[in-house]
Amino acid sequence: MHSTFLTQENLGRNDNQLIQEHADLVKQIALRIGAGLPSNIQFDDLYQAGLIGLLQASKSFDATKGASFKTFAGIRIRGAIMDEVRTSDWTPRSVSKNLRDIKAAKQTIENRTGGQASERAIAEQLNISLARYRQIAREAATSQLLSADESSEETRSLVDAIPSPDEDPNEQLQKEAMREFAALAISKLPEKERLVLSLYYDEELSLKDIAVVLSVSESRVSQIHIQAVNRLKDAANHWCN
């Protein structure tokens, strides 16, 4: 990771107090983001990046704009952590290889059966567990989200190669499959739409607070939110059909 490592020597008294007061917020956000990343990403690196975001927030916060410091700092902390992950060479080579293996297995099954390959059939073809297959799917979704600005036709085709799940009567499996689909669909949204959804649903900000953070009108935020939801509905309809 590329963040400057914070130590007692390069922090002032006010900075130390700020960190003590908001350390739990930084930890919470770092844990939330880290939960969706591969295991080779260290929590301490994410936490350090978040602390830098907190310090930056304290220097640029303007109370006259209406948002609370906690709200403003939360956005800067999250942004600093995400920027750190984006600029780091975190993606294991195995992610691309595993996805190519999935694509090849999917094609083999569909050529043999003449129908759509299910996730269970692909897992069996590759001699991996269904849980492992789903782990690969989550890593692919995370990779797509964090490298959206660098996406290519190859990357899109790899993500599209992940098939729809089985029609399983088990409700828990259905929910898991839907979460995976949602992650993939959201990763393909325009950056501003993804940001609005994240602030609204993950950070639980109001449309008014999001407008303050993005320096746009509340009606514009509402419009972006509606556009994003409509795109996801269209993707869901296509997925179900």
Image (cartoon, rainbow, N blue to C red):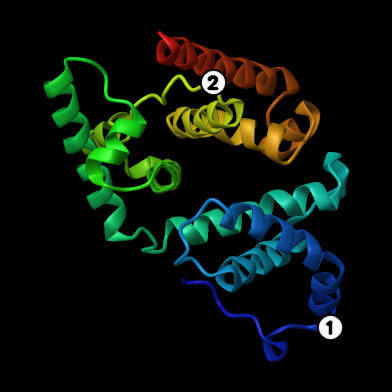
Query: Of the numbered discs in the image, which one, if any, rests on residue 230?
Result: none
Query: Of the numbered discs in the image, which one, if any, rests on residue 169?
Result: 2
Q: Secondary structure at mark 2?
A: loop
* Mark toward the viewer: 2 or 1: 2
Say which residue appears at 12% left-offset and 23% top-offset: 112
Instruction: Residue 241: name its quadrant.
Output: top left
Q: Local crowd at mark 1 within 10 Å, few (<14), some, or many (≥20)?
A: few
Q: Position of residue 67 (x, y in %)?
A: 84, 42
Query: Is 209 in front, or is 23?
Result: 23
Distance from the alpha carbon under mark 2 to that under mark 1: 58 Å
Q: Position of residue 10 (x, y in %)?
A: 68, 86
Relative height, residue 21 to residue 172 (above, below): below
Q: Secondary structure at mark 1?
A: helix
Give the residue type at disc 1: Arg
Say which residue appears at 31% left-offset and 29% top-offset: 160
Say which residue appears at 32% left-offset and 48% top-offset: 128
Instruction: Residue 216: name its quadrant.
Output: top right
Q: Is residue 133 left or right of residue 2?
A: left
Relative height, residue 179 to residue 234 (above, below): below
Q: Position of residue 22 (x, y in %)?
A: 82, 64
Instruction: Residue 221: name its quadrant.
Output: top right
Q: Read off the residue under disc 1.
A: 13
Q: Is residue 63 left or right of residue 25?
A: right
Whether residue 155 is visible: no
Q: Position of residue 226 (x, y in %)?
A: 62, 15
Give the residue type at disc 2: Pro
